[in-house]
Image: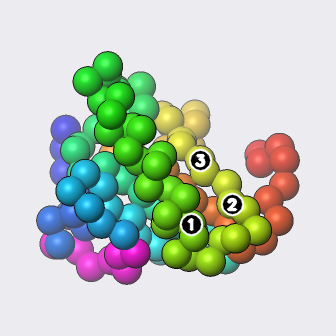
Amino acid sequence: MTETIFSKIISREIPATIVYEDDLAIAFTDINSQAPTHILVIPKKPIPKLDDCTESDQALLGHLLVCIPKIAQQAGLSDGYRVVINNGNDGGQTVYHLHLHILGGRQMIWPPG
């Protein structure tokens, strides 16, 4: 996998406002915010996109999902939030390092677009 802006955030080559970190994941505020609260949760393991996950990534993917409520609570999203994974070009993915968006702080509409 080629180096991405997210891998540079993990290695601290690029600064970010980190709101959560453990051995497997890191979360930081999105600089291109699409909601009042917009946090990205990424695995430290470089996985380009959801389609590239394998059975061996099952525990890591579960870990990412379990982290999200903790991060959302810490961010004050008690009224709810949306979790989004963009996959591939047509899915709107622009950085090819798997990441989950936590969006909140306002009423989300459906369909999103």
Q: Is residue 15 magenta?
A: yes
3D distance between C-alphas at marks 3 and 2? 10 Å
- The picture quadrant where one finds residue 108 is bottom right
- Boundaries of the magenta span: 13-19
Q: Residue at x 32, y 39 (%)?
A: 60
Which residue, given by chain and number where applicable, does mark 3 sit on?
84
User: In this orientation, which residue lies closer to the viewer: 84 or 75?
Assistant: 75
Rendered view: 58 above or below 17: above
- The picture quadrant where one finds residue 27 is bottom left
Q: Which mark is residue 81?
A: 2
Question: Which image quarter holds the N terminus?
Answer: top left
| Res 79 visible | yes
Q: Is label 3 or label 2 in front?
A: 2
**Tag 2 secondary structure:** strand
3D distance between C-alphas at marks 3 and 1? 13 Å
Cβ–Cβ below 8 Å for labels 2 and 1?
A: yes
Q: Is label 3 or label 1 in front?
A: 1
Q: Amino acid at mark 1?
A: Ala
**Tag 3 secondary structure:** strand
Which residue, given by chain and number where applicable, does mark 1 sit on?
72
Q: Amino acid at mark 2?
A: Tyr
Tell me if mark 3 has few (under 14), some (14-19) or many (20+) residues whose alpha carbon lies within 10 angstroms of its own.
Answer: few
- Earlier-in-chain disc, 3 versus 1: 1
- The picture quadrant where one finds residue 11 is bottom left
Residue 84 appears left or right of 28: right
Rendered view: 22 above or below 15: above
Where is residue 19 shown, x and y percent of the image?
40, 75
Q: Residue at x 83, y 44 (%)?
A: 111
3D distance between C-alphas at marks 2 and 1? 8 Å
